[in-house]
Amino acid sequence: AIGPPPSDRREEAIARLLACGSTPDHDHARRFLDFARTHAVNLDHLWCSMADDGRFKAVALAVPNPGRTAMFFASQPHSAEELQRTSEVIDALCLRLAEDGLHLAQTLLDVHDHDSETVFAGARFRRLATLSYLERPLRSRLVPAPPQWADGGRLVTYQPSLRHEFAE
């Protein structure tokens, strides 16, 4: 069955969602749940697929955002079966949220995370772009050299009195 985890197993589902390896980290899950409470992160859309023995085989979380959008997160699959189950959980959650008016589901993946890309493609997500902003090589701990300005270039702190100049 696919759906929300039992309320008494929510921490366990979050631990599976956040696990980097095959062993869920419950301390990490508790810290995440504390963070979510403190920062009002909506965890109402946590869904899972459980094995016959009760273990979580796949977990997905959709975090709603303004504009009827949601950011999706999914557990790392450890087998072909888990890969398929994770896609199914994400797809089912998307369909459920679409009934509530969700317009856009999205995720951000590491460019080298081919398993997650396969999981989301299996849930009918499409690759839109490779984002490369906010990256910086960390070659050394030295302070970077100051920027080189073009002739006549200058750095000015914005002030409301400079609005017209800024607009030009």
Image: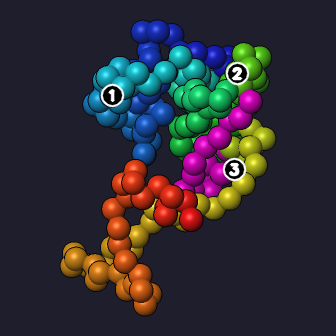
| Circle 2/circle 1 CB separation < 8 Å | no
Q: Look at mark 3 in the image and give the residue it sits on.
A: 118
Please give the name of the residue rendered at 66% of the width and 19% of the height, measured from the top-left corner. 2
Q: Look at mark 2 in the image and give the residue it sits on.
A: 97
Q: Estimate the spatial distance between the alpha carbons at disc 3 and disc 1, rounded to whole Å.
A: 29 Å
Considering only order in the chain, which callout, 2 or 3, is on the residue closer to the N terminus? Answer: 2
**Picture layout, residue 154 above or below residue 135:** below
**Picture layout, residue 49 above or below residue 129:** above
**What amino acid does circle 2 point to?**
Leu
Counting from the top left corner in percent of width and height, residue 11 is at: 39, 21
Q: Look at mark 1 in the image and give the residue it sits on.
A: 35
For the residue pair 85 and 110, the one nearer the viewer reads as 110
Quarter containing the C terminus: bottom right
Span colored in magenta:
103-119
What residue occupies the far top of the structure in this picture?
7
What residue occupies the far bottom of the structure in this picture?
151
**What amino acid does circle 1 point to?**
Phe
Please give the name of the residue rendered at 41% of the width and 30% of the height, measured from the top-left corner. 15
Considering only order in the chain, which callout, 1 or 2, is on the residue closer to the N terminus? Answer: 1
Q: Estimate the spatial distance between the alpha carbons at disc 2 and disc 1, rounded to whole Å.
A: 24 Å
For the residue carrying disc 3, how many other residues have a C-alpha within 10 Å: few (<14), some (14-19), or many (20+)? some
**What amino acid does circle 3 point to?**
Thr
